[in-house]
Image (spheres, rainbow, N blue to C red):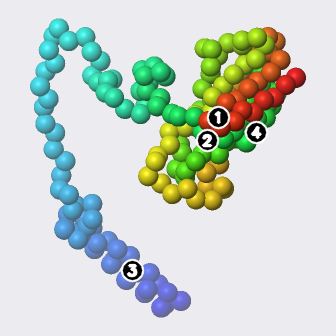
Amino acid sequence: MRSLVTVLMISSLTLAGCSGLRDSRVNPANWFGKSRTVQRAAPVQGETANPLIPEKRNSILQRKSEAEIYVGTPIYAVEGVVIERSAGGAIIKATGLSLRQGAFDVRLWPENGGKPANGALTYTLRAIQRTDTPQGPVQTRRVEAGQFVTSQTLDQVSEIRVLGQTNTATSRR
């Protein structure tokens, strides 16, 4: 019992002696020094912009209009189209095969402004595709895209068509 009390007494005294290290260079919290504050220039009185909102720049998070930005080309071949019911409409899922590996930003691009023509709703399966990548096996070239369609649009449609560069996939009611 005496040895336990002795060990506890020595460890508590050692721990209390460590408070001198808090201001030394050994403590990692002191490695970068104290923080400093600097006054900013006062904003111009006529300025109405909110300083918390950053200035608009061209970035991937900012979209102007779909036609201006998206530079996708049609996928080489469309393998299939599946239409799955969902709340308020359906989801059109298209699977395609690009000519080369590395296709990205795959979209179902609506033809005719997304409105049915003669009872058919037509989309083109498009992707941004590089030309300097290898062809590779089929598994690495397969791409998928989806598009939600409302029930009101589906009421006017009897056929959904997805176009590719070399073929077309169709799903009928």
- Under mark 3, the amino acid is Ser
| Mark 4 burial class by Cα count in 10 Å: few <14, some 14-19, many 20+ | some
Q: Earlier in the sequence, mark 3 or mark 2?
A: 3
- Under mark 1, the amino acid is Gly
| Mark 3 burial class by Cα count in 10 Å: few <14, some 14-19, many 20+ | few
| Mark 1 burial class by Cα count in 10 Å: few <14, some 14-19, many 20+ | many
Q: Position of residue 105 (x, y in %)?
A: 53, 38
Q: CA distance from mark 4 to mark 1?
A: 11 Å
Front one among 145 and 119? 119
Q: Residue at x 61, y 55 (%)?
A: 140
**Mark 1 highlights which residue?**
164
**Mark 3 highlights which residue?**
11
**Mark 2 highlights which residue?**
76
**Mark 4 highlights which residue?**
80
Q: Residue at x 83, y 17 (%)?
A: 158
Residue 108 is tagged as none
Q: Position of residue 100 (x, y in %)?
A: 55, 51
Asked if residue 133 lies left or right of residue 119, the reply is left
Instruction: State yes or no: discs 3 and 1 in contact (Cβ < 8 Å).
Output: no
Q: Residue at x 75, y 33 (%)?
A: 169
Q: Is residue 144 visible?
A: no
Of badges 4 and 1, the one in the foreground is 1
- Under mark 2, the amino acid is Tyr
Q: Earlier in the sequence, mark 4 or mark 3?
A: 3
Q: Position of residue 152 (x, y in %)?
A: 77, 11
Q: Earlier in the sequence, mark 3 or mark 1?
A: 3
Front one among 15 and 115? 115
Q: Is residue 36 visible?
A: yes
